[in-house]
Image (tube, helix red, strand yellow):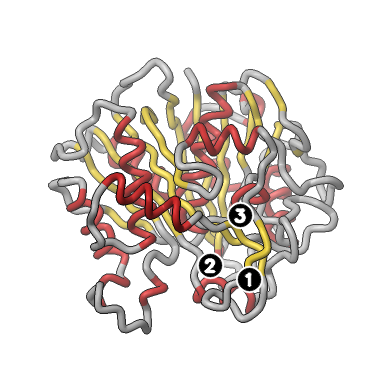
Amino acid sequence: MSYITSSSIISPLGFSSKETFNQLVAGQSSVRKIEDHLLSPEPFWASLIDSQLLEDTWYGLTKSDAFTKFEKIAILSVFGAMKNTAIDIESKDTGIVLCSTKGNINLLGRNDQNFKSNRVYLWKSAEEIGRFFRNPNRPVVISNACISGLLGMIAGHRLLESGIYKNVVVVGADIVSAFVVSGFQSFKSLSNGICKPFDANRDGLNLGEGAATVVMSAKQNNATDILMIGGASTNDANHISGPSRTGEGLFHAIENSFSQAGVGAEQTDVISAHGTGTPYNDEMEARALAMAGLNQVPVNSLKGYFGHTLGAAGLMETTILLESMRTGILPATKGHEKPGVSVDLNISGGNREANFNIGLKTGSGFGGCNAAAIFSKD
């Protein structure tokens, strides 16, 4: 078991977990039509962090210009999480895990005199982030498509269980860049409005940018700590970008997580789904949840609020799930109006209030990767 003792989100909806969560509960979305020729020659719908707010917040922390946008949001997220805990990030007993899909990919091909060419590599960003916080350990880098953040938590959980560290700081971040936008445009997978997870009229996803950090510990630090009691990943080996049509890969990740946690579908109170709003992902995920016997469990997707934040998604959405478990409020699935998958799911079309004791987080990504994690208040 691992205790999640602190968290922090940097998102277009707020620069803290609570601010972002409150915006979700209020039904606010930061997804909008973007017309920026530096990102795309044609308009697209996405959720972007306010550049001026980011710079003002950054210079309130440090006057250094030695970090990229990607690194800045990651550092601000870590800083926010560390403010709320007595855990020492400078200790040899504390490890750092950096999760991202693309990192500083926007530096590729640019002649940027401010950064050396090796800054495009994730290991270099992780090294710079670790140095900023004076952490003495070599950071772990997790980059496995859109399950990176969730997989990072599973890695942190295992690092704690193995006794390698007493505490682990897991941070995930990604930004919207021309490289990322063009990639998703080539797949024709972007929606022409706010995405509609699990809806009959869903037509694609929205990109988003943000960062989230969770601080995990081998021992309880606060009365509000939530336990991570299981987590697993699988690969369905189906296609380089398309998910399995059967959902078996994600189903096995869920079942393996339940086995580790010692709980089952009948004890699960809430699910935070990946729910991208694309036809194939949502159908696959719905089938996996049904195979696991989770049809009646309240489930939501957060992509309609701040978009798909790629490698940060698992961490941002887990942080919101933990807030739901603490407050007893499950935000609605924004954009969902009419059921549009082949199995019945208990989609949260409006905010719900209940006692959520056991929570499940799921994620899937390109290359057939899948992940699941189980959390408990007790």
Q: Which residue is mark 1?
A: 35
Tell me the residue at 31%/41% (across/down): 79
SS category of the residue bearing label 3: loop
Instruction: Specify the quadrant that holds the N terminus.
Output: top left
Few, some or many residues within 10 Å of mark 3 (<14, 14–19, 20+): many
Tell me the residue at 65%/75% (across/down): 187
Residue 49 is situated, as x and y percent measured from the top left of the image, at: 50, 55
* Residue 1 visible in the current orientation: no
Residue 157 in the image: above or below residue 288? above
39 with respect to 68 (left or right): right
Q: Quadrant of residue 104?
A: bottom left
Tell me the residue at 37%/44% (across/down): 77
Residue 291 is situated, as x and y percent measured from the top left of the image, at: 70, 44
Q: Nearer the viewer, mark 1 or mark 2?
A: 1
248 with respect to 237 (left or right): right
Q: Which residue is mark 3?
A: 307
Q: Amino acid at mark 2?
A: Gly
Sequence-first tag of 3 and 2: 3
Q: Nearer the viewer, residue 213 or 11?
A: 11
SS category of the residue bearing label 2: helix
Q: Nearer the viewer, residue 135 or 21?
A: 21
* Real-space Cα separation, disc 1 to disc 3, in angstroms: 16 Å
Disc number at residue 367? 2
